[in-house]
Amino acid sequence: MKTLGEFIVEKQADFPHATGELTALLSAIKLGAKIIHRDINKAGLLDILGANGVENVQGEQQMKLDLYANEKLKSALKARGIVAGIASEEEDEFVIFEGFEDGRYVVLMDPLDGSSNIDVNVSVGTIFSIYHRVTPVGTPITEEDFMQPGSQQVAAGYVVYGSSTMLVYTTGNGVNAFTYDPSLGVFCLNQERLTYPPTGKMYSINEGYYVHFPIGVKKYIKFCQEEDEATYRPYTSRYIGSLVADFHRNLLKGGIYLYPQTASHPKGKLRLLYECNPMAFLAEQAGGKASDGVNRILDLKPQTIHERCPFYVGNQYMVEDVERFISDNQ
Ligand code: AHM
Ligand code: MG
């Protein structure tokens, strides 16, 4: 048995000039994940279910646990003195960690993705994305530090709070998965160099919005439902409505997740910086692909912290199929 802490330290030895800062940063996320795990598991007991009546910058109801997870992760990241600031789904503006201008990293996060699922006991997740800052160390960070394309990510990952809690991350050298053992309080290595299975049989999309999808996506959905033994179609439809859980299942079983643009949401729903980019980094590191339907997600140049983009992620050939349907039906 190998713990996440041991694994990270072991990997750090591969980089003789590593300062240990990224190791400490990942430890902070690990600690935040343990705290969130603990409190999600007793959400009903602690009276932290339900909306708190506050809307976030995107006009969505924030759940009490969203705010709680945001605060816990923020303080875990701040405490180490390595991170100069963060951007979060739950913060209108990026947050400067005052007094920590020497930090070389910035972190973007969705502290509790899919939080509307908590009240009904369905899996939720934490998503994180780590960059080196681009402004000089020693000065306060600026928005520019967060406006980097996803290809510049130093590390990214997620924690899925499901039937068990798992942490999955990449530093650009493959994807590694760990399962949390609550009795020991440690994440244990589950799988090193995780990759998509060669064939996928699942497609995940909110088909309730079918009528609003672009024509290419409508045709791709019909393609998924057609019979063709050679390509394992019809595919199975699976949609939890929790990006982390849907992504995780497709990574393990093979499949594609789609969140297209619609007439009312011309850029889709998911946020580029702290939902699409980290998942895209993981997908590519696992041999898969992530696209906005036309472009590689990791090449997109962000304009604003909370910007959205259409998102197609999963087995490479499945994402290429949907891209073909989109370009053939422009
Ligand atoms: P959130 O960040 O407000 O929780 O929203 C993101 C979630 C994703 O986890 C999920 O895949 C998607 O929204 C579901 O959206 P919909 O209910 O429109 O299918
Ligand atoms: Mg989210």
Image (cartoon, rainbow, N blue to C red):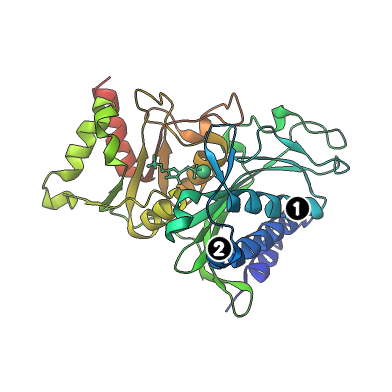
Q: Residue at x 42, y 51 (%)?
A: 247
Determine whether the residue tagged by mark 2 lies in a helix, strand or loop. helix
* Relative horizontal placement of residue 257, taking residue 9 as reference (left or right): left
With 225 as the anchor, is 23 left or right in this view?
A: right
Mark 1: amino acid: Ser
Residue at (67, 59) in percent of width and height: 32
Where residue 55 sits in the image (x, y, percent)? 57, 36
Locate residue 3 relative to residue 217 in the image: left or right: right
Picture quadrant of ligand 1 = top left
Quarter of the rendering containing residue 26: bottom right
What SS does tag 1 mark? Answer: helix
Q: Disc 2 residue type?
A: Ala
Task: State the residue in front, 206 or 176.
Answer: 206
Q: Quadrant of the N terminus?
A: bottom right
Q: Nearer the viewer, residue 37 or 319?
A: 37
Picture quadrant of residue 53: top right
| Residue 172 visible to an observer of this rendering | no
Q: Position of residue 5 (x, y in %)?
A: 67, 68
Q: Which mark is residue 43?
A: 2
The picture places residue 65, in percent across and down from the top left corner, at: 59, 53
Residue at x-position 59% and y-position 57%: 48
Q: Are marks 2 and 1 in contact (CB under 8 Å)?
A: no
Q: Is residue 79 visible?
A: yes
Q: Which mark is residue 75?
A: 1
Which label lies toward us, 2 or 1?
A: 2
Kindly identify which numbered label has been placed on residue 222: none
Q: Pointer 2: residues within 10 angstroms few (<14), some, or many (20+)?
A: some
Residue projecting furthest to the top = 330
Of marks 2 and 1, which one's residue comes earlier in the chain? 2
**Gap in angstroms between the C-alphas marked 2 and 1:** 20 Å
Q: Quadrant of residue 263?
A: top left
